[in-house]
Image (spheres, rainbow, N blue to C red):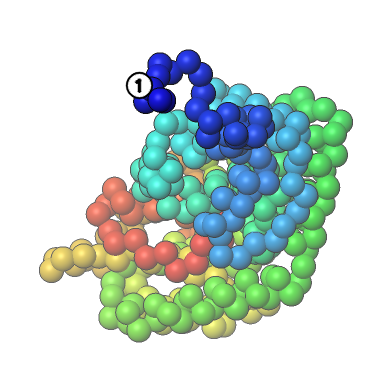
């Protein structure tokens, strides 16, 4: 007669029948979940990207070196380090990371956060933008990171090859034309909604986007600055831009970047908001080439060495509605 109440002296028949590798396999699965490979991390990053080019994926050792450099950037509180902290290091739910980074950068948050995420993806995973303006910007940042940190020969070689690929994208005339067409489509998409609105407009030319006049260092936590036109229209913002650029004789099509609209029933008197913008830009040292010269009264006095991020901050402080028309990611 079999005793059904036998003591538990060891593994059950089912447990003992499992392959010896089962426990090891389970442990490996748990380790992979906690420490995903670079390829797995790259695939996760690609889930949030609609368009991209793929460069060389750094190996595990090279990737670890790059992440160590980014940790040092976080300790130094550079803008890229802040992005790495919010998007990778801090204990924040994954679906809240990008919004937390945007909030960290305040009124400049949306464009700055999205741009920095693309910089991190390029450095860590070899994921590149298709737009030449952003590709040029990221290549410059990679070169800066290589100057600021000591990397092994293998890691430097990977970064140098990826920089070369980014510079190819930046120099691609077809990609540049596609970026221009995308900007024109974005402008057309808001044309009707801006016909009867009052506010400040910002435009520039592609040359100034490709070649910023004032390049910022990582420690400054500021985006690059370039020449931007900051004007005001009582009604019909894009029509006002058309009037200004139609006879300018510039061989490039303008890029309209922003509109900052007055809200509510009370519309400030003509030029008041524009003057507030200009005064704040002057006090920040962003005056353009003609504002402090004898040429001031002869035109060109509405051009400033500034950035859309800085202008977004001014608009936010003045309580204006921010319309992002084109996002070149300077």
List x then y, in percent, for residue 105: 41, 42
Name the foreground residue: 257 vs 272: 257
Q: Is residue 318 above or below residue 219?
A: below
* Coordinates of residue 95 in the picture (x, y in percent): 40, 47
Relative placement, left or right, of 181 versus 203 is right
As drawn, is 313 to the left or to the right of 293?
A: left
Q: Residue at x 80, y 60 (%)?
A: 168
Question: Can you tell which quarter of the image residue 321 is in?
Answer: bottom left
- Label count reads 1
Q: Quadrant of residue 8?
A: top left
Q: Residue furthest front?
A: 1
Query: Does 326 sit above or below residue 164?
Result: below
Label 1: how many residues lie within 10 Å, few (<14), some (14-19) or many (20+)? few
From this view, report whether residue 98 is shown above or below residue 69.
below
Closest to the observer, 13 or 267 = 13
Quadrant in which residue 182 is drawn:
bottom right
Q: Is residue 234 left or right of residue 301?
A: left
Give the residue at x 47% y 77%. Answer: 187
Identified at 82% across, 52% down, the residue is: 164
Q: Position of residue 62 (x, y in %)?
A: 76, 34
The x, y position of residue 290, in whole percent, is 55, 56
Could you tell me which secondary element the residue under label 1 belongs to? Answer: loop
| For residue 314, side relative to residue 230 (left or right) | left
Residue 307 visible in this rendered orientation of the protein: no
Q: Is residue 11 visible?
A: yes
Quarter holding the N terminus is top left
Q: Nearer the viewer, residue 76 or 275?
A: 76
Residue at left 57%, top 82%? Answer: 247
Which residue bears the numbered disc 1?
Answer: 5
């Amino acid at each position: 007669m079999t005793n059904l109440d036998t003591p538990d002296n060891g593994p059950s028949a089912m447990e003992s029948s499992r392959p010896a590798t089962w426990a090891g396999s389970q442990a490996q699965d748990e380790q992979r979940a906690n420490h995903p490979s670079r390829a797995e991390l790259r695939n996760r990053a690609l889930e949030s990207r609609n368009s991209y080019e793929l460069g060389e994926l750094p190996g595990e050792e090279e990737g670890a070196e790059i992440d160590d450099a980014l940790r040092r950037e976080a300790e130094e509180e550079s803008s890229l380090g802040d992005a790495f902290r919010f998007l990778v290091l801090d204990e924040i739910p994954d679906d809240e990371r990008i919004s937390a980074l945007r909030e960290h950068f305040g009124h400049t948050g949306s464009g700055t956060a999205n741009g920095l995420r693309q910089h991190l993806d390029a450095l860590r995973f070899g994921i590149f933008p298709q737009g030449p303006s952003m590709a040029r910007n990221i290549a410059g940042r990679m070169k800066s990171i290589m100057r600021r940190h000591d990397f092994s020969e293998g890691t430097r070689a990977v970064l140098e090859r990826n920089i070369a690929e980014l510079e190819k994208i930046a120099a691609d005339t077809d990609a540049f034309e596609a970026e221009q067409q995308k900007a024109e489509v974005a402008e057309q998409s808001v044309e009707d909604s801006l016909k009867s609105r009052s506010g400040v407009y910002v435009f520039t030319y592609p040359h100034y986007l490709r070649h910023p006049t004032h390049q910022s260092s990582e420690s400054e936590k500021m985006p690059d600055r370039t020449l931007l036109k900051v004007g005001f229209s009582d009604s019909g913002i894009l029509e006002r831009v058309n009037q200004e650029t139609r006879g300018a004789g510039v061989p490039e099509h303008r890029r309209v970047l922003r509109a900052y609209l007055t809200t509510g029933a009370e519309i400030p008197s003509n030029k008041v908001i524009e003057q507030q913008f200009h005064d704040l830009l002057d006090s920040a040292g962003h005056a353009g080439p003609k504002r402090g010269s004898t040429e001031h009264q002869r035109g060109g006095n509405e051009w400033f060495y500034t950035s859309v991020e800085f202008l977004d901050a001014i608009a936010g402080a003045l309580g204006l509605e921010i319309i992002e028309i084109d996002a070149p990611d300077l």
